[in-house]
Image: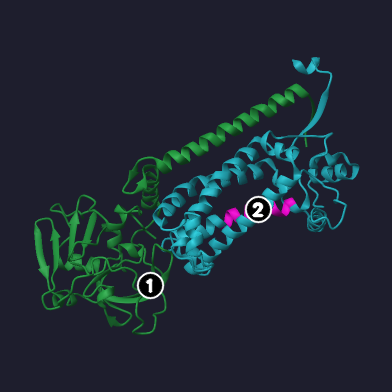
Chain colours: A green, B cyan
Amino acid sequence: MKKHLVSREDLQRRLFRSVVAGFVFITFALGTFLTIRYGPLDRKLPVALRKAQSFNEKVAAELANPERPAPCKEAPPKGTPPRVNGLIGLRDDVDGDTYRVIVDSGAKHFEMTIDEMMKLPRTEAVNDFKCVEGWTAVIQYAGVKFKDFMKIKGVGLREDGTPYPYVGLETPDKKYYVSLDSKSMMSDDTVIAWEMNGAELEVENGYPFRLIIPSKYGIKNLKRIGRIFFSDERPPDYWNKRGYDWFSGL
Amino acid sequence: MSAERSPEKIEIVEKYSRWVRYTHWLNVPFLFIMIWSGLLIYWANDEYVRMPQWLAQALFLDHRLAEGLGWHFAIMWFYTFNGVVYSFYLFISGEWREIVPLKRSFRDAIDVVKHDLKLTGELPPQPGKINGAQRFAYTGALVLGVFSVITGIAIYKPVQVQWLTEALGGYRAARLEHFIIMNLFCLFILAHLLQVFRAGWANLRGMIAGFDEVSGSSTSARESNAENARAAEAIKRGENL
């Protein structure tokens, strides 16, 4: 340790400077926190925190591969009821005979019956389903890969052949809605599912069709798909409006 | 200028450098926000230690998951960057030698704890700026910091870094590990504050202004003790005592 001799005045001056710097720091830190915390909100979250989310999204765009498949797991016993965590958009009765999924892609507009959807090539996967709350559950699910759906139905591409950057989904009553980046939707384990844990979807788990996208939190895995649409603009997203991160990528 | 006129000269040692002091104080709000926002997140799924509703309400921790996530994933950059700067400084300056436990530190740490609990009267001789117990505590805090970031990344992007998440025992294990680290941090902070309070102003001044008076009764002043000085010399030569 360096030792040296100083006068008491110099020492006190040095101490005084440091203490003042300390108070300036405390004021600055507290001021910054309070300004952010009680400042203007953007979709229920302080603006600065929204900016951080955009930054994180850019970092993810640079470093992450949105099509990376989630790690495979061992399937839960057949018939295990999947956890039910929310019923927004599921209050109306469902009639399988008259149910239609509306699809909008540019000028294309059509409706699909349950049978038409289930005739698409079936795929199956077992993955960890992760809720933004922090719980997880291994689920088996079966349905059509979203990218197969796009290819076969000829949707998702603009007139010039480039993909729309955003996909929107909503329940038939439009009370729950999500929007996602098309890149994540092209992952092999992103599926329009009609089966979970070896059984047909229950109403509270999204009968007849729900989205399963294991690279996103559960909030993006919309239940009871009423409409699928493609967009150049980012469509509104239920939980994003309520303060959550739009990207929510895992 | 006033130094010549002043009749009284005081011998001081430079205890903590600017880098150590700045990163230390910056870490206070960063770590505080990480723990606070982490609790806002933990509230939504309190699976390890149940957080009773009355407690969550009393501490304003309930129904603020979105806010918790917002802060956690913003301040994580500052918290991590600050920790990296601190680690690099320790490494490049060689000051890590003042922090890591020495061979003798384990015995010293026990003696220090015994002394502080008033079980024995004698403090062991202290080679370097800090005592054996402090060496364990500060190195431990740095290790906690490193693992808080590693486990944090594993549960932040468990699909992208699935190799890391799996290496930590899977998503649920990594979340528990992250939680345990937070608890250990809280324990560290508690013990740290208690000890700083006990040690008094001369010690705290070292972290604020950087210096310590040699003639005073403060901790590092005991270096004037011949045995301590010998031990300190040995450390400078790089010997592991």
For label 1, the SS is strand
Give how far across and how far down residue B213 sits, in percent: 79, 33
- Please state if B174 lies on the left or on the right of B196 as rendered: left
Most frequent secondary structure within the magenta stretch: helix
Q: Where residue B178 sits: x, y (%)? A: 54, 61
Q: Nearer the viewer, mark 1 or mark 2?
A: 2
Type of the residue with mark 2: Leu
Please state the chain letter of the residue tagged with numbered disc 2 in the rendered image.
B
- Where's the N terminus of chain A, which quadrant? top right
Q: Name the residue under label 1.
A: A127
In the rendered image, residues at marks 1 and 2 fall on the same chain: no
Front residue of this view, candidates A246 and B28: B28
Pinpoint residue A23: horizontal percent, then vertical percent: 59, 33
Residue A94 shows in this picture: yes
Q: In this view, does B164 lie above or below A138?
A: above
Using the image, tell me which numbered label, if any, was put on residue B190: 2
